[in-house]
Amino acid sequence: MFDIRQDCPIQSKCRRTGKPSMNEMIESIGNRTISIVLSFLDICMSAVITLSMVFNKKTYNSATFSVLIHQIYYTAVEILPLFIAVSVFLGTLTMGILFQTLKQFGLDQYLGNILVGFAITELSPFVTVLLLALRSSSAINTEIAVMKVNRELDTLKAFQIDAGRYLFLPRILNGMISLVLLNGLFSIILITSGLLFSQLLFGMGLNTYSRLLANSVHLSDSIILAIKCMTFGFFITFIPILSGLRTSYDLTSIPVSVLHGMIRVFIAIISIEVLSLIARFF
C-alpha cells in the first residue's frame, strides 16, 4: 500500500547531497520576503512618528536648537573643504563632457534644459547625498549603537531625559538642513562651471547664459528638487538612528548594525531617486 508519508525521490536525494529541498527553498524565500515587508512597514511607521515630531512646535526647546547648531557645524561646515574640492572636480569634469557632447551633436538649443534637468536637478542632489551618507550616516549609526551597548540610552531613560528630543531629532533636522545647503552649494559650482564652458565652447555671454537658465527652470522641478533633498536628508539620518537603536547589547553587534544600516541607507537613496524621476516624467 502506498504510504503518503514516504519522501519523494527528489527530497531524499536532496537530503543525501546536503542540498535544500524545494519546500525548504520556498519556505526560506517566503520567510525572507515576510521579514523584508515587515521591516519596511516598521521603518515607514517609525518615519511617520518621527515626522510628526519634526513638525510639532512643542518638540523644540533651547537645548534642541543648541544640539542642532553643533550638528550642522560638524556635518555641513567641517566637510566644506573636501566637499568644495570634490564639487569643483566633478562639476568641471561633468560640465566639460556634457557641453563638448552637445557641441559635437549640434544640440546647443538644449543646453539650458540639460543643465537644469540633469546637472542641477539630478546630479547635484545625488552626489551630495552620497558624500553625506558616506561621512555622516555611518558615524551616526556607530554613535547610537555604542550608546546602546554602553547603556547610555538606558541611563537617559532612567533620568527621564527624552532621547528623541535631545539626540535623534537634532540629527535628523541637521541631515535635512545640511543636505539642502550643500546641494545649493554644489549647484552653484555646477552653474559656474557651465558658464565657463559655455564661454569657451559656444562664445556665450553672461546675459545669454542667465536667460537660458531662467527659461529652463520650472516650478514643478524646483518643488520636486526641494522635497527630494529634504527626503534624502531625513532618511540618511533616520535609518542609521533606527539601526543603532536595534543593536543588541553585545559589543560585536556594532559593526553588524552599521553594515545593515548603510545597506538600508543606499537602498533608500536609490528608491527616492527612482520615485523622483517617476514624479518628474509621469
Image (cartoon, rainbow, N blue to C red):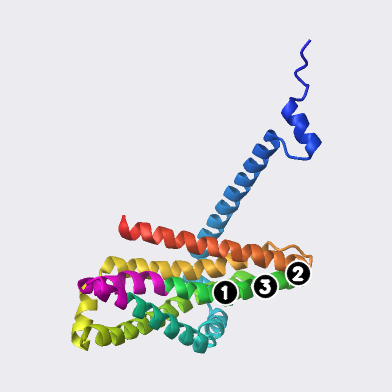
Residue 7 in view = yes
Q: Which part of the image, by quadrant, shows the C terminus?
A: bottom left
Query: Residue 139, percent across and down?
Result: 63, 76
Place of residue 216 in the rendered image (x, y in percent of width and height, measured from the top left): 23, 72
Q: How far is mark 1 from mark 3, CA to CA?
A: 13 Å
Q: Residue furthest right?
A: 16
Where does the magenta region start and end? 99-124
Local crowd size for mark 1, using a 10 Å CA cut-off: few (<14), some (14–19), many (≥20): some
> Within the image, what quadrant is residue 163 found in?
bottom right
CA separation in Å, label 1 and label 2 = 23 Å
Q: Pick whichever, 6 or 137, lies toward us.
A: 6
Residue 149 is tagged as 2
Residue that numbered label 1 is attached to: 134
* Image location of residue 42, percent across then percent down: 58, 54
Majority secondary structure in the magenta region: helix
Does the image show residue 56? no
Mark 2 vs mark 3: give the one in front. 3
On screen, residue 45 versus residue 149, left or right, reads: left
Closer to the chain start, of discs 1 and 2, is 1
- The image's mark for residue 18 is none
Q: Amino acid at mark 1?
A: Leu
Q: Is residue 101 magenta?
A: yes
Residue highlighted by disc 3: 142
**Residue in the picture at 55% in, 51% down:** 41
- On screen, 264 above or below 156? above
Q: Secondary structure at mark 2?
A: helix
Looking at the image, which is closer to me, 113 or 136?
113
Q: Name the kind of residue labelled 2 in the image.
A: Val
